Image (cartoon, rainbow, N blue to C red):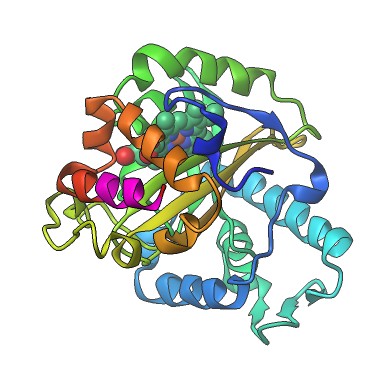
Amino acid sequence: MDNYPFASGRSHLQIGIKPLSEAEWIDISAAFAAELAEKERLLQERHAEVFVALPESQTAQQETLTLLINHLQTYAPELYRHDHATLVNQQTGQIWHRNEFAPLDLAGRLVQEDWVLLRSGQQGYILVAGSVCFPLRWSLPAKLGQPMTQIHAPVPGYQSKLSRPVDALFDRLKPGFPVWRMNWNIVDTPELFLPPERNQQGQNLTITDENAGEKLWLRRERQSLRRLPLSDHILFGIHTYLFPLQQVVQQPGMAAQLAAAISQIPAAIQAYKSLGLIQKPLLDYLRQKM
Ligand code: HEM
């Protein structure tokens, strides 16, 4: 799986879907324990911002949790011990009593992936539940009950170029055949929880071509999609990774590829991605590293 999607030359408004093997559905990275702790903190302190569910989603939530636990039993059998009442994370020592949580809330606590459940409706696919601790400047509660076109309303070109192909892709998804795609951004903070009000990055005057490597991060989302066989919902998984820019540019050719990709982003998408004033020092920095 490529770590750096811009390296493939994919443009921004492409679906860019590839098949995902069952073994790769969940990724347990070196940040596992730290990110699970951060999720627990957010779910405790700001629950209404990071977990939402319509009552109708209960069956699909339960199906998600069962699928995830079965998956972990198979592919990471040493990680969790569980019975019908409790789940124990053997790496972090966390213990959860199942009846204290909505099933999707619990599914969000077990792995680094964030989760969204969608079902087919008259206006396309509707968001019916989510456990999203690591949003990139968007609000989960604001998207509850919305169809995909409305969820993506702030994304320039989504409505005209992506909406129909994405809905058609969802229609074609078959249980047992997950797929994945990648999204990437440059951000000026290593914080994973970025609500919409944290959208000042484009006005950040402190980034220079000298400090861009220390003050900017490549933020990559590995997104998975699968159809649940019983409830017929779509389960969307988002695993967020952060790489310090100074680490990214150490890899041969990366500074040049990233600079090329950023220069090619259309103006409306540059604005959407909050590049703004950081774009020039960022490009100057990357060119020095080529
Ligand atoms: C094949 C499927 C999908 C495609 C092609 C797609 C495409 C995109 C694109 C191009 C962006 C802009 C990202 C950027 O450049 O930074 C975006 C943002 C976003 N996507 Fe998707 N997406 C897909 C599936 C989903 C699903 C299933 C959800 C479920 C909720 C979702 C929720 C969002 C949200 C919340 C944003 C941020 C919107 C905002 O700024 O308010 N996407 N998506």
Please give the name of the residue rendered at 69% of the width and 44% of the height, measured from the top-left corner.
Answer: 1
Name the quadrant containing residue 28: bottom right
Q: Position of residue 29 (x, y in %)?
A: 65, 65
Q: How many marks?
A: 0
Q: Is residue 179 left or right of residue 41?
A: right
Q: Is residue 253 left or right of residue 193?
A: right
Report if residue 285 lies within the magenta region.
Answer: yes
- The front one of 183 and 87 is 183
Report if residue 265 lies within the magenta region.
Answer: no
Given the current orientation, which residue lies at the most extreme bottom position?
A: 93
- The front one of 156 and 214 is 214
Q: Is residue 23 left or right of residue 265?
A: right
- The front one of 220 and 253 is 253
Which range is magenta? 282-289
Please give the name of the residue rendered at 45% of the width and 25% of the height, measured from the top-left corner.
Answer: 11
Image: 33 above or below 109: below
Q: Position of residue 136 (x, y in %)?
A: 36, 51
One can see residue 141 in this view: no
Image: 36 above or below 124: below
Q: Position of residue 92 (x, y in %)?
A: 66, 84
Please give the name of the residue rendered at 70% of the width and 54% of the height, measured from the top-left corner.
Answer: 26
For ligand 1, give the image quadrant: top left
Please give the name of the residue rendered at 51% of the width and 55% of the height, measured from the top-left corner.
Answer: 240
Q: Position of residue 255 (x, y in %)?
A: 43, 47
One can see residue 88 in this view: yes
Q: Main secondary structure of the magenta part?
A: helix
